[in-house]
């Protein structure tokens, strides 16, 4: 069980050039930024740092934090900000 949790939160890269571990939040940040810049090479690299489940969790957490930060910055509700970002009508 402990090994599964360790694997979820971080994974050692197999590259000889980069022996350090990447955590899921680092992977999510690099992955999302690469998606925004349409950088497929960086997307693929970040996606290989952690399991798909961990990456999904990290991206979800990043999205939540970003919506909360934007909502505070614009003095709006998180729901309103999320809908605006996705081009959805107000409820």
Image (cartoon, rainbow, N blue to C red):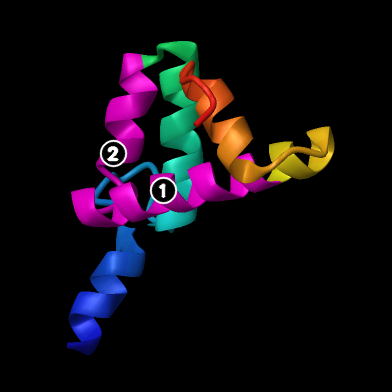
Residue 72 sits in quarter: top right
Give the mark toward the camera: 2 or 1: 1
Spot occupied by residue 69 in the image (x, y as percentages of width and height): 71, 44
Q: Check the picture and name the quadrant holding the N terminus.
A: bottom left
Label 2: element kind: helix
Compare residues 12 and 88 and report the one nearer the observer. Answer: 88
Main SS of the magenta part reads helix
The disc label shown at residue 15, or none: none
Residue 60: numbered disc: 1
Which residue is disc 2 drawn over?
47
Residue 23 lies, in percent from the top left, at 43, 59
Residue 76 locus on image (x, y percent): 75, 38
Q: Earlier in the sequence, mark 2 or mark 1?
A: 2
Q: 23 or 71: nearer the eye?
A: 71
Magenta-colored stretch includes residue 48: yes
Q: Quadrant of residue 27?
A: top left
């Amino acid at each position: 069980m402990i090994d599964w949790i360790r694997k979820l939160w971080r994974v050692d890269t197999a590259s000889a050039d980069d022996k350090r571990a990447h955590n899921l939040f680092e992977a999510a940040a690099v992955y999302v930024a690469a998606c925004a810049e349409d950088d497929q090479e960086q997307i693929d690299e970040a996606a290989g740092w952690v399991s798909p489940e961990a990456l999904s969790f990290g991206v979800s957490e990043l999205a939540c934090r970003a919506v909360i930060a934007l909502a505070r910055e614009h003095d709006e509700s998180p729901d309103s900000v999320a809908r605006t970002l996705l081009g959805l009508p107000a409820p």
